[in-house]
Amino acid sequence: MVSPFVCRSRILLIGVSWVLTLVLGLSSLRMVESFASGNPGWSVLGRNNIRLPSLAAEKKKWNADAYETDRLAKDKESMDSMRSESEVEFAKLRTPWKWVIRKRIWDLLESKDIARPPRPVHHRIPNFDGALQAAERLATLPEFQAASCVKVNPDTPQKPVRKIVLTQGKTLLTPQPRLRTGFFSILSKESLPKGVRIADCIISKGVAQHGTPVGLDEEYTVDLVVVGSTGVCPQTGARVGKGEGFAELEWGILSLQGNIDAEQTLVVTTVHDEQVVDDIPAGQLTKHDVPVDIIVTPTRIIRVPNRAPKPSGVFWDLLSPQKLAQIKVLRQLKEEIEEETGQTLPSGPDELLPPTAKRNRSKKQPSSDATRKATE
């Protein structure tokens, strides 16, 4: 039997324990509240329940100006690094000065939102706002109106030119892109199958489907040549393309085969006004570069007053093994000439071929009304 004294002692101990527990609990709560009040990133949720740093508090402490300054600094560091790498790569190419001009114009067209799809325009003949207006202005040239057969490059900004050529009943001569699958195709409105729209025949797939392939030994005469450009000089007609040299190769083959008169056949380019530049050094052009006679923009027609000389034929000593390996028709032509003459043609030095364009498929690019009309 437990004595009354022991019972009272146990009750007293239990009571003291409760009091101590209550006091300690209150003290802890006050400490948390005190800590939370002095630290706005913390808050109390009920009894002994502490929330992690709140988003609202973190936003208050976030310094937008410091973040933006840091972001811009890192962007600049990254861009400087990429620019340095690009300059090193361009220096390995045959004409690095052309790449300085190309990159400047590509960057300008993108930064001013003059560029039109496909974008980005880097490493392309750049499409531009006003390509349709430039094509319509080209169609007013007496030389265009008198031409029966017009050669037009296959790039996007000259799509409306190809449409006008066919619409006006002229013969369109257009190369297969990068001469990958062949040489040229010929189309005319009269030769199109019934029900085939002209708009379907001014893109690569339509040309391949509805055009008539042209071989190296076909007899025809080109009356006018339309080329695309990245930049062009209004004084000498010196131009830079996208860096792959196909306009020059096509000119060389056609002049060698007698389909073009290198002295008399006019060369026209359609570009945006921002692509007309005065810092292309004509004296540094290579001997195969083809200058233009007429520059057409959405706002004006420029007849080049002091055009640089035009080349004639294929300069085999400039053709690298890498470029020759790319183009079947060139290898075929070289074999024919060597077999006919019994002599081995010269070969150019090795070269680093320039990069090709990459289409941005991550999102649809906006296009102007003029660009949409040109594709209809």
Image: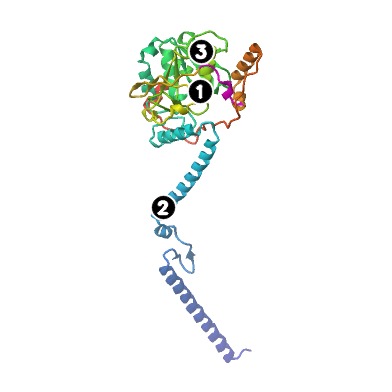
User: Residue 318 lies in magenta, yes or no?
Assistant: yes
User: Residue 87 lies in magenta, yes or no?
Assistant: no
Q: Mark 1 points at which residue?
A: 287
* Mark 1 element type: loop
Disc marking residue 186: 3
Residue 285 location (% of width, % of height) = 48, 26
Of residues 276 and 6, the one nearer the viewer is 276
Residue 150 in the image: above or below residue 74: above
Residue 37 in the image: above or below residue 154: below
Q: Residues within 10 Å of mark 3 (few under 14, many from 20)?
A: many
* Mark 2 element type: helix
**Residue at x-position 58% and y-position 30%:** 351
* Mark 3 element type: strand
Q: The N terminus is located in which quarter?
A: bottom right
Residue 284 location (% of width, % of height) = 47, 28
**Residue at x-position 53% and y-position 41%:** 85
Residue 200 location (% of width, % of height) = 47, 18
Hey, what amino acid is under mark 2?
Thr
Disc marking residue 258: none
CB of mark 1 within 8 Å of CB of mark 2?
A: no
Magenta stretch: helix, strand or loop mostly: loop
Gap between marks 1 and 3 measured at Cα: 29 Å
CB of mark 1 within 8 Å of CB of mark 3?
A: no
Q: Earlier in the sequence, mark 1 or mark 2?
A: 2
Q: In the image, which residues are magenta?
A: 312-320
**Residue at x-position 56% and y-position 17%:** 183
Q: Nearer the viewer, mark 1 or mark 2?
A: 1
On screen, residue 113 versus residue 180, left or right, reads left
Disc marking residue 69: 2
